[in-house]
Amino acid sequence: MSVVIKVDQVSKIYQLGQIGTGTLASDLASAWAGITGKDDPNKKIDDESDKSTHVALRDVSFDVNRGEVLGIIGKNGAGKSTMLKILSRITSPTSGSIKIKGRIASLLEVGTGFHPELSGRDNVFLNGAILGMTKAEVNRKFDEIVDFSGVEKFIDTPVKRYSSGMYVRLAFAVAAHLEPEILIVDEVLSVGDAEFQKKCLGKIKDVSTGDGRTVLFVSHNMEAVKNLCNRVVLLEKGGVIDIGSPATTVNAYFKRNTNYFGHVKYSATNAPGNETIILLSADLKINGGDILEIDKGVAINFEFELRQSFDEFNYSLNMFAITGEHIFNSQSASFKAEKGILKASCIIPPNLMNNGDYSISILAVNKGSMPLFNFENVLQFEIFDNRKDGKWFGEIGGAVRPKLDWIL
Amino acid sequence: MSASDKDENWSQIIRPTGGFSAFNIVELWRYRDLIILFVKRDFVSVYKQTVLGPLWHIIQPLFTTAVYVMFGAFVKIEYGGIPPVLFCLSGVVIWNYFSSCLVKTSSTFVGNANIFGKVYFPRLCIPISIVISNLMSFFIQLSLLIPVLVYCKFVKHAGIEPNVYLLAFPVLMVLLAMLGLGFGLIVSSLTVRYRDLVYFINFGIQLAIYTTPVIYPLSMLKGKAVLITSINPVTPFIEIFRYSLLGQGTFSLPAVLYGVIFSVVILIIGMIVFSRFERDFMDTV
């Protein structure tokens, strides 16, 4: 196996804040003040803030072998995009080096440089050239590209008249026929319809297995990563956390990101609540494992301290998507509650929720209609997808994804 | 670098930008198709969008020429027997090419941030394609100049003598392109840091026209004014062009050499500065 990309101790540090003042006029004023010995008119009182830096990548090293599909995963801000930008030469590293064998082409964004006034045909040539193909190469592949895109009828129409789907398909078709030795693919699965998505994934597989070319695949879509990649790099906060087989690395990713705060515990002094009730702790108990996937049930356990007794007490649990959408409300039966420690569990069955980020609020209610206290945003967690058939990797919409009975 | 690194033939090594990286002409050549396609894109987008698109290239020099001619009549500039319209227009056409090269290439980084942020190709493709696209409007303006010339010569029988120096015309255009490109590259690199520089340039280029013999013959100047106009590297090019077309102009070998050397040097400096800035540009926008 030969190494085609050797990433060696690459770091990227961004300067935060503004460098200089941003305008020539004020920089000249500063320089003049310096010469004449006056105070810099543009100097900020709090000058420290301008000097801060952000480390996007820290000593990242890994090798990529010929013919493999290497996945790069990590949360937003982990450094995936920065890594790709350096690999595709959009920006340069602050230190370290990357050695590459062969031509790299990236699908960071399909349709780059498409001009609305130009026809589909002209755009294929322009886009191909931007992506590094010569005119002869595009000529040779033109029919194949048009075929792949499925827009033959409109190939001489300006792309401004295209539907967005046609536009994306044509753009992807160009990129897919680049034939570079190394292809960088970033989140292409979010575009197009099911049929087209299948085509794309097929193309990625063909490229790597059939032609022995190398693919770097960056995605948030763990299902696709697991199905397509030979090896996966997990990035977190700019560093490499794990490199290994897709199954283990994806699991490591899930474990590290299982919850934002799936467990909370308060002391008497900082506990949320009022003179009637306070929250002592809350946690998630996942049934059968430590990764919350859609087909796993979960118990949400609470511990409260009641500061007075109530004859008719109940809970009302609200589940929200992290975007703020109210998913559901579930109320407990009323019961007689004594002053002191009070425990409760709410069980969310498997195969109810869709994958996504959620938060939970719980309301303590007296006499069925009088709120005692609303504990907002008690827990936040992510429910991960767990699709096993591996045919469709796109998003499945909806707030819930219940498993219902079907009569067929 | 260890021995094993040297054994393997890496096709590309990405390193931090240190100092002034060498400018990669081989790579640029590989992307020649892209330059041609950019030119084609500019052409199509100008001519498909508006009726006034190409017309604008004619209206603008006509208006400026009219203004200069009126100004010339007002301050009684002596054009040496050349019809004032012809005199000014010939200067304006040359100057317009130079200034449009400079102004348009100077917004290379800022104007293409979107595409530069997504894909790599030699950034120099954009300014080079701009310089070529500008030839298009230059030839439109030239097609305006020629009927005026023919009219003045054969109807008005003005004393104008197109001559063998016209052969130098292609060289002249290349040098002007180099000059405009060189300045434009320097300015575009600086605009990465100083956004307001674009306004300075737009303003400055309008003033700079008065330091060239666009609206007055070089022969009428005396003293300090001669020095100022001869510092401007566009001056000898305008004079040669006018001499080749109208048979009247003032230029000397040192002045021409100055123009040629200046163009070459400014282009080299421009390319070095540009290549220094192009790789880290995306971090600063």
Image: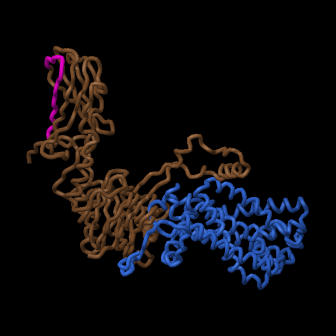
Chain colours: A brown, B blue
Towards the viewer: B191 or A165: B191
Q: Main secondary structure of the magenta part?
A: strand
Q: Is residue A138 left or right of residue A245?
A: right
- A177 inside magenta stretch: no
Residue at the extreme bottom: B164
* Image coordinates for residue A142, horizontal then vertical, percent: 38, 73
Q: How many marks?
A: 0
What range of the chain is rendered magenta?
A: A335-349
Q: Is residue A250 left or right of residue B220?
A: left
Residue A319 figure quarter = top left
Q: Is residue A53 left or right of residue B2?
A: right
Residue at 29% from the left image edge and 23% from the top image edge = A273
Residue A120 figure quarter = bottom left
* Image coordinates for residue B167, horizontal then vertical, percent: 72, 84
In this picture, is A399 found above or below B137?
above
Towards the viewer: A131 or B280: B280
* Image coordinates for residue A234, horizontal then vertical, percent: 29, 57
Residue at the extreme left: A407
* Image coordinates for residue B91, horizontal then vertical, percent: 77, 69
In this picture, is B251 found above or below B224?
below
- A337 inside magenta stretch: yes
Residue at 68% from the left image edge and 58% from the top image edge = B201
Residue A330 figure quarter = top left
Asked if residue A234 can be seen in this view, the reply is yes
Q: Is residue B245 left or right of residue B113?
A: right
Residue at 31% from the left image edge and 69% from the top image edge = A64
Figure quadrant of the N terminus of chain B = bottom left
In this picture, is B90 found above or below A76?
below
